[in-house]
Image (cartoon, rainbow, N blue to C red):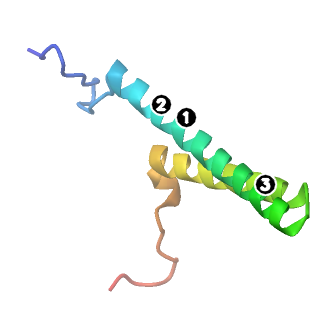
Amino acid sequence: MKGINRMDDEQGRRRLTVGEYFSTAFTAAATLAVAFAIGFYGGQWLDRRLSTYPWLTLLGLGLGVTAGFRTVLRELAPDLFRRRDKPGKDKP
């Protein structure tokens, strides 16, 4: 008999609970917001120091967006970033 808190599918794999889904979604949203803000405000700060407005703000925002999505994808889909062995080479 399955316990109340245990969530397994037909193949015996563990499924996420509602709380774990909310936690994952909040963590992803917070990660994206922080990365966007750091990139945007870092670019603005550099623009004020170097008088290059709006170019470094746009560059910083682009870097923040890229870093944020890359971080979230690494957490949610780690298999996409796992290194694969090159074909034709033996493993040591």
Q: CA distance from mark 1 to mark 2?
A: 5 Å
Kind of element beneath mark 1: helix
Say above or below: 41 vs 33: below
Q: CA distance from mark 2 to mark 3?
A: 27 Å
Residue 69: % across, % down: 62, 47
- Left or right: residue 45 versus residue 75 is right
Is residue 7 depicted above or below 59 in this figure?
A: above
> Which circle marks residue 26 in the picture?
2
- Mark 3 secondary-structure assignment: helix
Name the residue located 36 percent from the left edge and 19 percent from the top edge: 18
Residue 36 picture location, percent across and down: 67, 46
* Quarter of the figure with the C terminus: bottom left
Characterize the local packing of mark 3: few (<14), some (14-19) or many (20 or more) Cα atoms within 10 angstroms.
many
Q: Residue at x 27, y 24 (%)?
A: 10
The tally of labels here is 3
Q: Are marks 1 and 3 in contact (CB under 8 Å)?
A: no
Q: Amino acid at mark 2?
A: Phe
- Residue shown at the point (78%, 63%) measured from the top left: 46
- Residue at 75% x, 58% y: name it: 45
Question: Disc 1 vs disc 2: Cβ atoms closer than 8 Å?
Answer: yes
If you read the primary sequence from the N terminus, does the residue marked by circle 1 or circle 3 appear first?
A: 1
Q: Which residue is mark 1?
A: 29
The kind of residue on which mark 1 rests is Ala
In screen coordinates, is 1 left or right of 38? left
Q: Specify the label residue 44 is tagged with.
A: 3
